[in-house]
Every structure is written in C-alpha cells, then in structure tokens.
Image (tube, helix red, strand yellow):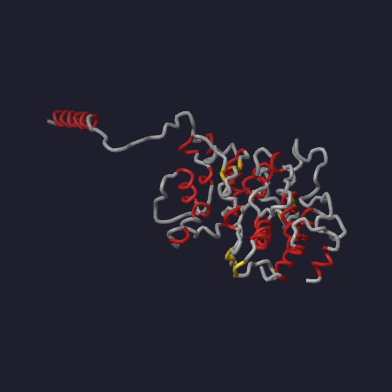
Amino acid sequence: MKHLTIILIGVAAILLVIAGCEREITGDLKLADNSSVGCFDCHSDSDVMLRQARIQYENSVHAVADNSNRNRLYNSRYQSCEKCHTHQGFVEFVTAEPATGDHFTAIECFTCHAPHSSGSLGLRVQDPVILENGVAFDRGAGVVCATCHHSRQDVTTYVVDSVSVNSRFGPHHSNQSDMVIGTGAYEYAAYSYSSSWHSTGVADGCISCHMSNSMHESVGGHSWNMENEDRGFENITGCNQTGCHDTSPLGDLNPLASADFDWDGTTEGVHDEIEGLLDSLVVLLDAANLTDSTGRPISRTVASADSAGAIYNFKFVEEDRSHGIHNTKYTVGMLQSSINFLLTGNPNGAPSGKIAMISSH
C-alpha cells in the first residue's frame, strides 16, 4: 500500500506538469532581450563610473528639485511646466507616451538615460532641438540639455508694439541654448549682431565644458557645476582642452575682456564688463519706468517694441547666468544696443560721454 501511494503521487505530479505545459499565456507579455548585457557590466563594484556620476549628481541643482511640484497633480496650471521640472513629464515629452501614476518625481538618472530598456547609457534625446523662434540647436550630445534649457518665448511675436508687460515678462528661466548659438534676444533693426566662437566651435555644446573634469565630486561631470565657491575651485578643464584655449590657457572663468565693453575707462574681466553693462542698463530702465531698480519689469503697456526689447535683453542676459561667457559678442551686442537706444533713440548711438549720461539718471 505504501508503494502504491508513492506511485499515485508521482503520477499526479506528472499530470500537473503536463497540464501546466499546455496552458496558454494570453495578453501582451513582452520581455526585454538584454541577453547580451550582463547586470554586472553596470552594477559591479569594480567600475566606479556610475557611482561617481551619482555622487556628482547629488551636488547638482537638478538634485535639489525645488520646483518638482510644477506638475498637473499639484496644480493643473503647471502641466506645461512638468516636462522640464519632473522626470515623468520629461519622459512623456520626449517619448510621447503618457505619464501615469499618482505622483511626479524629480529629474534623475533615468530622465536622460534609459539603460534598462535600451541596453545602453545613450541619451533619450538625439535629434536637434528646435527653439521657439524656429532656429535649430544642433550641438551633439548637448541637445538633451537644450530640450529644457532654452527660452520659452519667440521674441519676434512676443516683443511687439503696445505689448503688455508684467513682472514675469521675459524669456523665462534658463535660456542658455539660445544664448550659446546667438539667437532669441531682441535685435534692433539697425544694429549688426555677431556671435563668439562658442556658438559654432564647441561640438557638444553644453556638456563639453560643464561635464569636463568628470572625476571631481562637486564640479564638472554630472554635477554640471562650473565652480565650487566654498573651495574656490573653478572648472577650466574644458576651456583649455585641445582646439579651444589650449594655445593661451585660461586661468579662471573671468578672463580679461578684449575691450572696455562697459565704457568705464578700464578693460576688466568679461564677467565684470558684462556686470557693468547690466548696471548701466537697469539704471536707464528704472529711469524710463520700465523696471524697478533691481530690473524687475513694471506692469504696464509699453508702446514701443524697442523699449520693451531693452527689458527683454536685460532679462535674457540675467537668465542665461553665464555673465557673458556663453557668447560674449552676442551678450555685449544686445546690452550695448539696448543702452544706446534708451539713451539716444538709436541702437548705434556713439559711446562718448555715455557713462556721464547714465550716471545723471
């Protein structure tokens, strides 16, 4: 009897196996074929690249995530913001696959990379980014940055005669891509604008400089920071690489300007010259009741597009936040032409006596 029981149990087990093999799986079941990619290619303890990138990221502005509440769940009016302020919004924007779930999270590694579905650390964005004015930003791997870091306004339709101005008037924050390639500012019809070598000479745009020196924890790499003020460290590695400033290396991020851009009688560092122009412009904007003394636009209707354009250019340079380094010639051009117009009504007004005239306002 004991042997018979064992035999019956064995037969039952075989029947269960056979029945299981005959079951049909229905529905959409798709398994990614990553057989050529081993988990430990990325997750081993012998390759520090990903861990170093994570440490750098934790020192970035992106990791702070102060504005990740700019999404439709927090407030419906923020839906247009979520594509740059949240991971889910960005992925939805670049893949056209609707975001799902009951919460939005901050920008992180898988926002720009999708290794578990693509099998590589390639970027989600590969194609040129078309800016609001129709100009293409095509700077290699820098296109992923440009997806968010560009103006939200087309200046040609935004700055017009009898435009309504308020405290939010301007290109919105982080218009770096426009600045780098020299487009998107308010350009006076009679003035000739030009751009610096950065606009065409840096193949990968943003990342060539901001991600250089990738083994430092708080500067360069995935921190994207260009300086650590606490340690007095500036990342000039990318600046002095072959093909850039290698023949005449930079010592810091405030190199001596090529001319006295702000007309104060002394040629200083690029940062200082641009700050001098911004200081002069805001004095004139304040005197014309276009902004307050800090450059904050005053709510009103501005009759002339050229006057409103001076406000726009002030905000354009401020929001870029590179102090003229991204595109020195374009920055100087837009500030000088704005100052000239407010002083004389002519964007090409002569600089002689300019500082005295500004100081008198």
Residue 347 lies left or right of residue 126; in this view the side is right
Residue 63 lies left or right of residue 5; in this view the side is right
Residue 288, percent from left and from top? 70, 70
> Is 353 rendered above or below residue 246?
below
Q: Residue at x 62, y 46 (%)?
A: 222
Residue 352, percent from left and from top? 86, 60
> Is 94 rendered above or below residue 25?
below
Residue 313 lies left or right of residue 275; in this view the side is left
Q: Residue at x 46, y 55 (%)?
A: 104
Q: Nearer the viewer, residue 111 or 33?
A: 111
Quadrant assignment, res 267 = bottom right
Residue 199, percent from left and from top? 69, 43
> Is 221 rendered above or below residue 232?
above
Residue furthest left as drawn? 1
The quadrant of the picture occupied by the N terminus is top left
Q: Residue at x 48, y 47 (%)?
A: 93
Q: Nearer the viewer, residue 140 or 191?
A: 191
Residue 209, percent from left and from top? 69, 44
